[in-house]
Amino acid sequence: MKINVMTKVLDANDAWAAENRSFLQLRKMDMVNIIASPGAGKTTFLERTIDLLKDTVRIGVIEGDIATARDAMRIQKKGVPAYQINTGTACHLEANLLNTALKGICAENELDLIFVENIGNLVCPAEFDIGESAKIALLSVTEGDDKVEKYPLLFSEASVLVISKMGLLKHTNFDIDAATAAFRKLNKKAMVFKVDSLEGTGFEPWIEFIRSRIAKQPVSA
Amino acid sequence: MHELSIVNGIISHIERQKTEHNFDKVLSVELSCGPYNCISDDNIQFCFNAIAGSSWISGAKVAIKRRPLSGEDCHDNAIYITKLEVLNEDKCDDKSP
């Protein structure tokens, strides 16, 4: 007997993602999901972003790692609340974990914007909707310009591509034009920003992008 | 690693269908995914076999069909269960040994 099903395999996760969106919408909050390889510079990027935004935007950060609270502790030193999720083994965050984290971080904090720093991985986090309004793909120049083609799911789904560690560009053979062209083949609409988090360069358009989101308070997939 | 979550989702759906259609065995599961999804037949089958163990769903073959990219901005990379081939042993419609 053949049964036609036509149901999303991850519908349980999607239901949690929808609940997260409702939670955020009720509180007029936005949430973005930063996805990148381990060592691409996600936490340093967040630290610089926080420095530039925290005086005018109430920020919270949800950190995802397999182990340790190192990244949450770095964020807390910036004076913003951080909630650490340790998955133990899972290489990606799922929406049910975010639901618990959102309730935890919002229990004692009034926030405008949540940054989720997903587990360092260019593959699995892209498969899971966690209730974010935007996926932010971070790619450092030290990783190679071929990574866009090699990991198409993330780069096709991202609302923003941030090319990081621009200060090291001259020490690599990363071809910005090639990476951007490969990205455009997958993604016609996303914005591209080029930054160096340690030097603090290139952040103005990214900050403007974030501010415009706060002003609109969109919460959509 | 995310294959485990995907397979758990598949098994949940199979169990829901069993409640509705009352079958005893699953012969095959067909999935549909977008052109960029990071899943492969071998990995999904491996994880399925590992989780199914010797339970009533063991032995099912999992096949993945990839949807072609359609339209300039196709972002439907969701993974769907499209078909189940099942057996109700009471009805004896499978004559194989």
Image (tube, grey):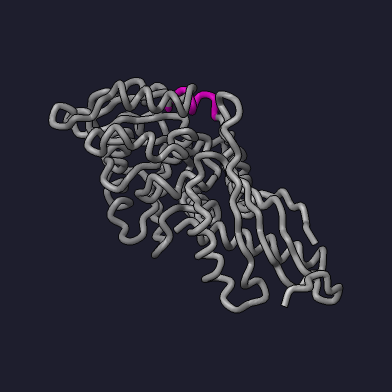
If the image is split into quadrants, where does the C terminus of chain B sit? bottom right
* Pick the front one: A197 or B50: B50
The answer to if A211 sits in the magenta stretch is yes
Q: Residue B77, image x and y in percent?
A: 56, 40
Q: What stretch is highlighted in magenta?
A: A210-217
Considering every residue shown, the one lying at the far right of the view is B91
Q: Residue A106, image x and y in percent?
A: 49, 48
The answer to which quarter of the image holds residue A216 is top right
Residue at (46, 53) in percent of width and height: A93
Q: Residue A145, image x and y in percent?
A: 29, 32
Residue at (52, 71) in percent of width and height: B50
The reply, left or right, for residue A64 in relation to residue B30 is left
Number of disc labels = 0
Q: Does residue A201 lie above or below B58 as drawn? A: above
Q: Residue A65, image x and y in percent?
A: 36, 55
Q: Does residue A110 lie above or below A55 as drawn? A: below
In this orientation, does residue B22 appear? Answer: yes
The answer to if B75 sits in the magenta stretch is no
Residue at (66, 63) in percent of width and height: B12
Label the magenta part by its dominant secondary structure: helix
